[in-house]
Image (tube, rainbow, N blue to C red):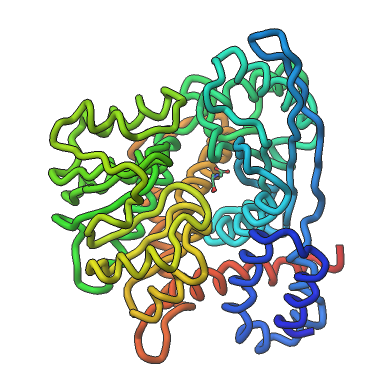
Amino acid sequence: MNTSEIMARLKVKHANEKEYLQAVQEVLETIEDVYNQHPEFEEAKIIERLVEPDRIFTFKVTWVDDNGEIQTNTGYRVQFNSAIGPYKGGLRFHPSVNVSILKFLGFEQIFKNALTTLPMGGGKGGSDFNPKGKSDAEIMRFCQAFMLELWRNIGPDTDVPAGDVGVGGREIGYLFGMYKKLAREHTGVLTGKGMTWGGSLIRPEATGFGAVYFVQHMLHVQGKDIKDKKVAISGFGNVAWGAAMKATQLGAHVIAISGPDGVIYNPNGMTDEKIAYMLELRSSNNDVVAPFADKFPDAVFYPGKKAWSIKCDIAMPCAYQNELTGEDARELLDNGTWCCAEVSNMGCTPEAIAEFQKAKILFAPGKAVNAGGVATSGLEMTQNAMHISWSAEEVDKKLHEIMSNIHHSCVRYGTQPDGYINYLKGANIAGFMKVATAMLEQGVI
Ligand code: GLU
């Protein structure tokens, strides 16, 4: 079967899983040529096997809220592919979480993890639990109840979850505490741990830092530097925070950050105090960015507007899937934006990507740009397995090398005959070749 036939069948079989179908379609479209050049892949039905997760666990999570009321949520873990290493990927706690979203994230994770050069397979999990407005004690009880079900299916050499939207250091702490109690072992079963109990230095910053390192490489190829460039970032979570910090350190001006309530126009760029305040805003658990403008008088809040309405050189979506639409892309292009580095997973709609590529501006996909996060999780696993911890400099140096390698792979597989670098194609082909070859060598399993 060719890739279009496989896609057509999937659309029938999983008709209501739109995010999953979108993620698969994007990959299949870009790897088609390579797939056709390798009849051994078709013979071994590699794509048919790759698009279905190995298994999905779905479980009930019951917990008691602060009013003594019993709450019921649904928990999931999608173990997608373990061809090159144990399943690896984050947990997302957000009311939108469902099987389609976790399958799309798990599928993306396979290629992303392959790109990091580290031995990690792809997985993802989470719950429709909404952390917004919950007390610390409620978060703890939920995490404990979640782990009570999950713990038998994970392990340091089996499946290693981490954070994602709604799951940060605090949640990983509660999840790890419960795992440790049940399994009676202190191992690297989760990443993103606290620094005194097995976490890796730089992990909290890694996704944002890695994304900016990737942008530096993209710019370098064009003979440009990030210094003095205007950067618009969506979101004010962990990833946006790391990206804002690194971009500022390198002399760029972060002139926009945004939340579900609107955008902050920040014409003078970030300061250490502003960057620190991003973390404070996030931990306030209210999901609003507006207070930033109350605290810093040189910043202006525009309710209901997106970061993409602010004139910038470089756009870095750091929030959710499909947050940057075709219309947003046209607005950015009209305003002269010449680089979009997707940091969120599948942050741009297919229409937005088509606009960027048609205009031949620099565009790179999340699975390449944000891979520094999971790569540093991989480094955390290595440190845990060796029972040592590396210095921040050592980890940062390795992160630099990994981002440089990922960029190199994208250029290798994505450079078009006219010289335009199709980073999307490059990332997908590089990831696919590695996983497909491993699957082929391991036989029909
Ligand atoms: N959730 C992050 C991602 O999308 C990190 C996963 C991890 O560290 O395992 O890649």
The C terminus - image quarter: bottom right
- Residue 420, placed above or below residue 324: below
Q: Position of residue 217 (x, y in %)?
A: 31, 64
**Residue lying furthest bottom in this view?**
417
Q: For the image shown, how many numbered marks are present on the structure?
A: 0
Give me the residue at 35% from left, 39% from top: 241
Residue 135 on image: x %, y %? 55, 15
* Extreme-right residue of the structure: 444
Pick the quarter of the image with the N terminus.
bottom right
Looking at the image, in which quadrant does ligand 1 appear?
Answer: top right
143 lies above or below 257? above
Residue found 56% across the figure and 70% down from its top: 428
26 lies left or right of 248: right
- Residue 387, image quadrant: top right
Foreground residue among 295 and 51: 295
**Whether residue 356 is situated above or below residue 382 in the rendered picture:** below
Question: Residue 149, how many percent across, how many down?
Answer: 80, 28
Q: Position of residue 337 (x, y in %)?
A: 26, 66
- Of residue 312 and residue 111, the one placed in the foreground of this image is 312
In-image side of 377 versus 224 (left or right): right
- In this view, which residue lies farthest toward the front? 303
Q: Quadrant of residue 33?
A: bottom right
The residue positioned 77% from the left and 64% from the top of the image is 15
In the figure, residue 64 lies in which quadrant?
top right
Query: From the viewer's perspective, is 152 left or right of 20?
Result: right
In the image: residue 441, left or right of residue 371 = right
Q: Residue at x 67, y 38 (%)?
A: 126
Residue 175 seen anywhere in this rendered image of the structure: yes
Residue 395 in view here: no
